[in-house]
Image (cartoon, helix red, strand yellow):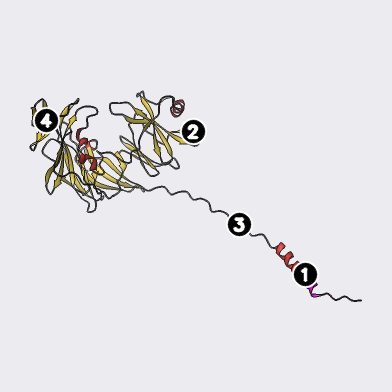
């Protein structure tokens, strides 16, 4: 007797075959995760000074590729030259600080038109210690004065007389004098601030007491915001003991202490020599894997005085006649320069809203 196969049989067969087919299909593959790409090395622009023939000095701008552009050449030794930039990055000033009987001199440069260097006179009164720019782009000079002062006494109090105003003489160690701020208007200088101050001691404030001094922008004679703070490591601290164990011979006998400076890639350790004005020197060390190591191909004399600057992930190590640039993330040296002075990062244009005092005198 024949049995007929019903619809249920055929439906089950179809489902079974479908399941078999699915089991034969390859399992979907997960695409491999993309490899992390290394961060590109940061770009930079440097300001350099380089000796020129006949005891001159050339101001140079150099970019990441090594391309250089001569900004200006002046007849002054590079060791005596200070620089300043306007906040908008369009103008610059070179100042020969002078030496002995040689009075200071100054030149202005227009970066956009490549005009310059154009010499300009400095205030006739006193000694010009520094020249820079205020927030509005005016040229400003800070002047110290120790001679030709009007000094009087009344009821046991001594004071300087400036334009009819009394400025009490500071009662502290050192040589009392005046500090002036001048602003250049057209071809003339106008005095905008005068303060009684002290000179000729190790910690004498000099012209830094001027309110104008704190409001100048981008000057090699002023405070550099890209210089990291050096934190002293106390004797016997874990880091100091570790450094002493690694560095058996510093290469010099300068008395001082280890300091730590923060970078994008962790601390950098340096030796701070306790001179009249403390300075940083080799040895330099930072963490490389699980050990303390000198920055790659540093190649500096152990007796060199160094300056350190940090911009983002970049570290700039500057000595008297050379500079090294490192990527602090990879701890690799990415550039080196020899035969240059006062290398530093070229300031970025910025907006500054502060205004300098106008026609003020203050006592200190």
Q: Nearer the viewer, mark 1 or mark 3?
A: 1
Quickly name the residue at label 1: 12
Boundaries of the magenta span: 3-14
Residue in the image at 32% along x and 30% along y? 279
Residue 40 spot, x, y in % from top left: 43, 49
Q: Residue at x 40, y 39 (%)?
A: 263
Q: Quadrant of the C terminus?
A: top left
Are circles 3 and 2 on residues that touch, CB within 8 Å?
no
Task: Spot the residue most to the right.
Answer: 1
Please give the residue where the numbered disc 3 appears in the rendered image.
30
Q: Are marks 1 and 3 in contact (CB under 8 Å)?
A: no
For mark 2, does the 10 Å Cα neighbourhood hold few (<14), some (14 to 19), or many (20 or more) residues?
Answer: few
Q: Is residue 12 left or right of residue 319?
A: right
The tag earlier along the polypeptide, 2 or 1, is 1
In the displayed structure, 172 sits above or below 3; it is above
CA gap, disc 1 and disc 3? 33 Å
Please name the predominant secondary structure of the magenta segment in the image. Answer: helix
Residue sitting at 29 percent across and 42 percent down? 48
**Furthest-front residue in view?**
155
Is 38 left or right of 187, judged from the image as shown? right
Q: Which residue is mark 4?
A: 159
Task: Kindly indicate whether the residue at mark 3 contacts the one at mark 4 (C-beta within 8 angstroms).
Answer: no
Label 4's element?
Answer: strand
What crowding class fits label 4: few (fewer than 14 Cα within 10 Å), some (14-19), or many (20 or more)?
Answer: some
Disc 2 target residue: 291
């Amino acid at each position: 007797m024949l049995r007929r196969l019903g619809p249920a049989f055929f439906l089950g067969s179809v489902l079974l075959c479908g399941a078999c087919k699915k089991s034969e299909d390859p399992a979907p593959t997960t695409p491999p995760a993309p490899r992390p790409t290394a961060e590109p090395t940061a770009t930079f622009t440097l300001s350099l000074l380089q000796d020129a023939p006949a005891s001159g000095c050339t101001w140079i701008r150099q970019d990441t590729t090594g391309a250089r552009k001569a900004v200006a050449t002046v007849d002054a030794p590079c060791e005596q030259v200070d620089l300043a930039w306007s906040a908008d990055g369009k103008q610059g000033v070179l100042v020969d600080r002078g030496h002995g009987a040689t009075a200071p001199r100054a030149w202005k440069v227009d970066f956009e038109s490549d005009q310059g260097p154009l010499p300009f006179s400095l205030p006739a009164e006193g000694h010009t210690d520094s020249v820079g720019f205020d927030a509005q782009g005016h040229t400003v000079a800070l002047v110290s004065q120790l001679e030709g002062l009007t000094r009087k006494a009344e009821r046991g109090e001594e004071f300087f007389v400036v334009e009819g105003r009394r400025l009490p003489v500071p009662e502290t160690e050192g040589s009392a004098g005046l500090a002036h701020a001048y602003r250049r208007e057209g071809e003339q200088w106008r005095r905008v601030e005068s303060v009684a101050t002290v000179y000729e001691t190790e910690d004498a404030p000099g012209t830094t007491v001027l309110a104008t001094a704190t409001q100048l922008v981008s000057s090699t004679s002023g405070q550099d915001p890209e210089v990291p703070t050096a934190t002293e490591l106390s004797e016997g601290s874990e880091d100091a003991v570790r450094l002493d164990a690694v560095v058996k011979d510093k290469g010099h006998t300068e008395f001082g202490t280890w300091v730590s400076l923060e970078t994008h890639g962790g601390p950098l350790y340096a030796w701070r020599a306790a001179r009249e004005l403390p300075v940083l020197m080799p040895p330099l060390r930072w963490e490389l894997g699980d050990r303390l190591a000198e920055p790659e191909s540093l190649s500096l004399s152990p007796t060199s005085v160094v300056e350190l600057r940090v911009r983002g992930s970049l570290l700039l190590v500057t000595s008297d006649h050379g500079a090294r640039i490192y990527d602090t993330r990879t701890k690799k040296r990415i550039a080196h320069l020899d035969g240059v002075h006062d290398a530093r990062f070229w300031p970025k244009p910025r907006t500054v809203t502060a205004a300098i005092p106008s026609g003020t005198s203050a006592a200190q």
